[in-house]
């Protein structure tokens, strides 16, 4: 069987490290970033940071409003369960074939070959690029919400705040060399998440108690309801999945599979509770009029709302770094960026390369600041394929001889079902973007 590495499939020229711990010898591809250094608890917080990022402030509007109470609640619970299952399949393949697969594309390339390596990398790149674009839109929305609390002159538009957000994200990305270096920042991120989630929760409860009866009917025509429902299904899986599990698992200490399972159980139990709370309470308080950015709907003391928006902005900056790290790792490894992260050459490289990457993200975010549509499209064209289709088929192929006929049928059903869902959700998301593009001009102030 061919040996695959981070630069391609079947090329064994790149040097590899071989470790021998706990009587287990595993080949690890070369990387410029730190691996096997983090506890399962720290990795669990990385996953939880993603799931409770400021995106949670949009789920009341982008999931519950299009689906309504019963489908929305059931959908979130089912999405939690199937996401845990799909992620566990990928986690269990991390050392498949006696090699440490520290990148999603490495795992796909090892199982399928060179073409799958390239396709997976393309899918993952699109997935992470759109997630990061959404984070910059979120950060800009938080800054704009903060601005309108203190000024109603409307001089500053959303694209200006998106530009500011992109600049701050670039500064943070340049300062933090790799994923494991987040360290203390994960604790800061957790505190920031709790601030805006608690504020949104409490103020939503207050508004819900004081407000008259709400309308929970799903808005739109019959045709638009069909498309928004399909789009919301993509948002459901987007809410729980990173599309970069092997890259996160690469940072965990050995034994990598059992420790990663602990991190996943933490993410999908304690980690999802804050997200559930703010999503359901937000929809209960405002019904079908819930905003796609919940802090724009709540009423309360200005200083409390300001604190929540500042927290959402800062947490978004930290969370974006997680989802940009696979691209950073690829570029740092390709160009041999090693040694002290603040050496002149290394620092200059990060300023130029990471700054350019986030500049492109920021430009796209300002051009098309439709957050809900980006979530739907990301879920459709990359989250479904990476997390559900590819995970099930890779596991089926890797464990083919160890699976019963019933287990094989189960995995094939998953592949076919999520394949159809991916196509339907992509069509729905593109339609939503086309409709919004007609309603708003580029660089819209939403």
Image (cartoon, rainbow, N blue to C red):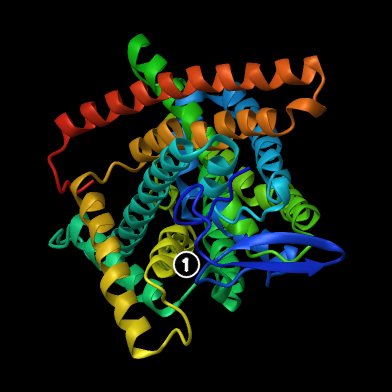
Q: Is residue 75 above or below residue 248?
A: above
- Residue 443 in percent (x, y) is at 15, 49
- Give me the residue at 42% from left, 24% from top: 425
Q: Quadrant of residue 160?
A: bottom left
- Give me the residue at 79% from left, 15% from top: 406
Residue marked by disc 1:
318
Q: Considering the image in quadrants, where does the N terminus appear?
A: top right
Q: Is residue 426 visible?
A: yes
Q: Is residue 202 visible?
A: no
**Quick one: 176 or 283, which is closer to the camera?**
176
Q: How many marks?
A: 1
Dot 1, crowdedness within 10 Å: few (<14), some or many (≥20)? many
**Quick one: 186 or 91, which is closer to the camera?**
91
- Residue 109 in percent (x, y) is at 53, 42
- Is 363 displayed left or right of 346 in the figure? left
- Residue 174 in percent (x, y) is at 37, 76
Q: Quadrant of residue 359?
A: bottom left
- Is 13 displayed left or right of 352 in the figure? right
Query: Of helix, strand and loop, which one carries label 1?
Result: helix
- Give me the residue at 44% from left, 47% from top: 294
- Residue 366 in percent (x, y) is at 21, 52
- Is 218 displayed left or right of 27 in the figure? left
Q: Residue furthest top?
A: 222
**Quick one: 219 or 204, which is closer to the camera?**
219
- Give me the residue at 46% from left, 64% from top: 329
- Is 90 displayed left or right of 262 in the figure? left
């Amino acid at each position: 069987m061919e040996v695959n590495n981070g630069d391609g499939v079947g090329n064994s020229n790149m040097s590899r490290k071989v470790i021998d711990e706990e009587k287990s010898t595993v080949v690890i591809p070369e990387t410029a970033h730190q691996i096997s250094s983090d506890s399962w608890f720290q990795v669990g917080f990385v996953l939880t940071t993603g799931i409770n990022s400021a995106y949670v402030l949009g789920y009341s509007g982008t999931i519950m409003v299009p689906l309504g109470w019963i489908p929305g609640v059931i959908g979130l619970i089912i999405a939690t369960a199937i996401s845990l299952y799909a992620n566990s399949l990928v986690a269990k393949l991390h050392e498949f074939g006696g090699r440490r697969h520290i990148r999603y594309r490495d795992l796909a390339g090892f199982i399928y070959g060179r073409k799958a390596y390239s396709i997976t990398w393309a899918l993952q790149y699109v997935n992470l690029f759109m997630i990061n674009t959404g984070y910059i839109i979120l950060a800009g929305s938080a800054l704009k919400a903060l601005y309108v609390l203190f000024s109603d002159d409307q001089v500053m538009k959303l694209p200006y705040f998106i530009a500011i957000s992109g600049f701050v994200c670039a500064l943070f990305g340049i300062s933090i060399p790799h994923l494991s270096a987040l360290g203390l920042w994960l604790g800061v991120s957790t505190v920031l998440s709790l601030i805006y989630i608690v504020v949104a929760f409490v103020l939503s409860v207050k508004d819900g108690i004081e407000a008259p009866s709400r309308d929970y009917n799903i808005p739109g025509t019959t045709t638009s309801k069909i498309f928004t429902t399909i789009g919301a299904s993509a948002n459901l899986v987007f809410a729980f999945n990173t599309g970069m599990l092997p890259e996160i698992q690469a940072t965990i200490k050995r034994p990598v599979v059992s420790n990663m399972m602990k991190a996943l159980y933490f993410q999908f139990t304690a980690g999802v509770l804050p997200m559930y709370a703010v999503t359901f309470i937000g929809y209960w308080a405002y019904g079908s009029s819930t905003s796609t950015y919940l802090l724009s709907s709540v009423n309360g003391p200005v200083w409390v709302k300001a604190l929540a928006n500042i927290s959402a902005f800062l947490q978004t900056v930290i969370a974006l770094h997680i989802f940009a790290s696979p691209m950073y790792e690829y570029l740092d490894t390709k160009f041999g960026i090693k040694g002290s992260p603040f050496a002149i050459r290394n620092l200059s490289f990060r300023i130029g390369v990471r700054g350019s990457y986030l500049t492109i993200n920021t430009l796209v975010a300002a051009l098309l600041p439709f957050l809900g549509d980006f979530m739907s499209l990301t879920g459709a064209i990359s989250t479904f394929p990476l997390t559900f289709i590819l995970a099930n088929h890779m596991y089926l192929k890797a464990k083919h001889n160890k699976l019963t006929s019933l287990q094989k049928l189960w995995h094939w059903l998953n592949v076919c079902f999520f394949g159809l869902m991916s196509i339907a959700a992509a069509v729905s998301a593109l339609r939503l973007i086309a409709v919004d593009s007609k309603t708003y001009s580029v660089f819209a102030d939403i």
